[in-house]
Amino acid sequence: MASADFSVPLEPAVKADLEAEARLSNQTAAEIAEAAIAQYLFGRKLKREAVRQALKETEDGVFISEAAVSQWVQSWGSVDELPPPEPDLSTRS
């Protein structure tokens, strides 16, 4: 795939950190920046999809109660960690 030049102004400290990481990882600063941008964009795409799915569930009247979410979160890191809760509330009869 062909690449295109792209210029981004960076704060001096960020540029120095990027260049240091490039030296330490035996990569170019451009390779690290490209990977970071790709990861950021992928994360944004996942977030948009999660929001889209949540809005669909809202339109369908499907919800997870605060109690179920709290119980799940409180179990994080414990031996008995719970799976993500399933919807337990509905506005539909």
Image: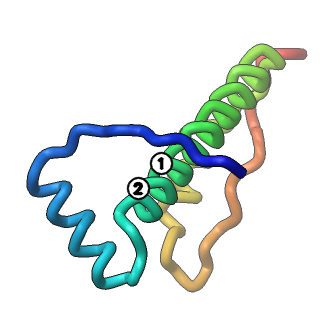
Give residue 17's quadrant in the image.
Answer: bottom left
Q: Which of 41 and 32 is in front in this view?
A: 32
Where is residue 64 shown, x and y percent of the image? 67, 37
- In the picture as drawn, the residue positioned furthest to the right comes out as 93
Which amino acid type is marked by label 1? Ile
Where is residue 63 shown, x and y percent of the image? 71, 30
Q: Nearer the viewer, residue 44 or 18?
A: 18
- Residue 17 is marked as none
Give residue 44's quadrant in the image.
Answer: top right
Residue named by callout 1: 37
Rendered view: 60 above or below 17: above
Q: What element carries label 1?
A: helix
Identity of the residue drawn at 29% across and 80% down: 23
Q: Badge 1 local density, few (<14 within 10 Å), some, or many (20+)?
A: few
Which amino acid type is marked by label 2? Ala
Where is residue 88 shown, x and y percent of the image? 76, 38
In whole angstroms, how far apart are the C-alphas of marks 2 and 1?
6 Å
Q: Badge 2 local density, few (<14 within 10 Å), some, or many (20+)?
A: some
Identity of the residue drawn at 64% across and 42% down: 46
Contact between labelled residues 1 and 2, with CB atoms less than 8 Å apart: yes
- In the picture as drawn, the residue positioned furthest to the left comes out as 12
Where is residue 54 shown, x and y percent of the image? 69, 29
Q: In which quarter of the image is the C terminus?
A: top right
Residue named by callout 2: 33
Identity of the residue drawn at 51% across and 69% down: 76
Q: What element carries label 2?
A: helix
Identity of the residue drawn at 22% across and 74% down: 20
Task: Give the color scheme: rainbow, by chain, secondary structure or one colour.
Answer: rainbow
Q: Nearer the viewer, residue 83 or 50?
A: 50
